[in-house]
Amino acid sequence: MIKKLLIANRGEIAIRVIRAAKELGIKTVAIYSEADKDCLHTMLADEKICIGPGPATESYLSIPSIISACEATGADAVHPGYGFLSENSYFAEVCEACGIIFVGPSKESIEKMGDKIEAKKIAKKAGVPVVPGIEESVKNPDDIALIKEIKKIGFPVIIKAAMGGGGKGMRIVNSEESLRIALLTAMEESKKAFGSDKIYVEKYIEEPKHVEIQILADKKGNVVYFPERDCSIQRRHQKLIEESPCSVVNEHLRKKIGRAATKLAEEIGYYSAGTVEFIMDKKGNFYFMEMNTRIQVEHPVTEAISLIKGKRALDLVKEQILIASGEKLRFDADDISICGHAIECRINAEDPDKDFLPSPGKIESVTFPGGNGVRVDTHIYAGYTIPTFYDSLIAKLIVIGTNRQEAIRRMLRALDEFKINGIKTTIPFHKRVLQTQAFIEGDVTTNFLHKYIYEQA
């Protein structure tokens, strides 16, 4: 078993990992930047160590600083959380070379799934449905043969960055006339965001659902999948609200999608927690999109509705740590069942009325919601000042109900109770979405906000 775990992250996910590790009897080390000296995760860990100035490039993205922190504190393992270095294969390789356990998959798995063009080829080889598209990266936007291939796919098409995500380097193109500029812009944006201008083109599935499958796999070849998450409520391709199970997925379709995710994991010899993401059209056809080789922001909704041998016993972070320690999965697919419906709202320090402009600053006061079926994952407190250097996510509000209708009502009640003064947040925005008739009826696709929120404004 791991003896001392350093969490190479900050904020709520660092706290999430600290709590799981402590419950397993593992000592914890928090790293922090100079801007995060008062962040809650530094107060909850057994030890803390400063790794550099506020900018992430000089702290949370500095591999030498993190490895030095491991050596200074005697940590024998690192959990990367999500974001930052969580899907950096070189970081996983350096940890291994230094004799530090990386709580995540192998560097080979990260590399294979990190390049989305190669990931699609692997998925296709494994028999997983993929979106029709160009199988090679775009090298020259003026290539006549390339233009012909794209025209064969048929407009609209979507351009994506091969090495990244989060909507960066992504463009939807509706005609040949706008194709060249879109390709050039996507390449430039991808280069700036991910250090690579490698992009690819595929058919754009209009009004799809974004459905993903959480998996766990151990180092002995055992893989299990969990009920799907619907992550269709997005702005600029970034998720805002997630729920599980998906309102239009029946048991037969659930098994098909789950088996597809399992096949992909088996194809690359994957271990640890991971998420296989799909897009699904109105007819229930689903297509592989990408695999995230880390724990996801929205993992609590899966924990909330998954029963293991009839009990609420799932802790995905604990399972990650146990797998990294060489443990075999303690349950199989037949032990997993669904109970209830869960919804997660990402609470961001942003102003929804000003195009989600970041709203850092001091939190003057905060009141957290509570009651039956309510969970809050956060690192904020009264008097805490949100730094300007990092992602705007400040809390995750998760509720579970006996059914979707109860979960919606419970979430609205919890949002009413959640009071944060001193900054702008997305709480009012979430209330608006959840009270939209289309959301209540389950008419949720990736263009939901444009169709029912922005156009109605």
Image (tube, grey):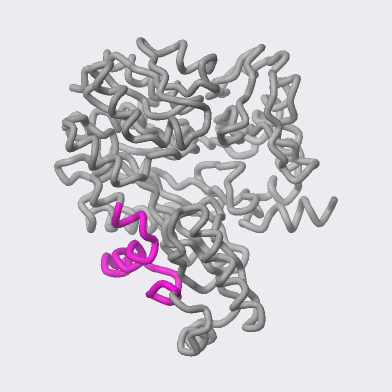
Q: Which residues are magenta?
A: 111-138
Residue 113 highlighted magenta (yes or no): yes
Residue 306 highlighted magenta (yes or no): no
Left or right? Give the position of 287 relative to 21: right
Q: Residue at x 29, y 14 (%)?
A: 27
Closest to the observer: 363 or 441?
A: 363
Residue 223 figure quarter: top left
Left or right? Give the position of 258 relative to 370: left
Residue 349 figure quarter: top right
Closest to the observer: 158 or 128?
A: 158
Q: Residue at x 27, y 69 (%)?
A: 125
Q: How many marks?
A: 0
Closest to the observer: 53 or 437?
A: 53
One can see residue 81 in this view: yes
Q: Position of residue 268 (x, y in %)?
A: 23, 55
One can see residue 217 in this view: no
Left or right? Give the position of 343 relative to 326: right
Residue 1 figure quarter: top left
Q: Residue at x 54, y 20 (%)?
A: 379
Q: Position of residue 452 (x, y in %)?
A: 76, 54
Residue 311 lies, with reference to residue 368, above or below; the image says below
Q: Residue at x 48, y 85 (%)?
A: 143
Q: Position of residue 309 (x, y in %)?
A: 31, 31
Q: Position of residue 95 (x, y in %)?
A: 24, 35
Residue 188 lies, with reference to residue 65, above or below; the image says below
Residue 127 lies, with reference to residue 377, above or below; the image says below
Residue 245 lies, with reference to residue 24, above or below; the image says below
Residue that protrudes farthest toward the right in the picture: 457
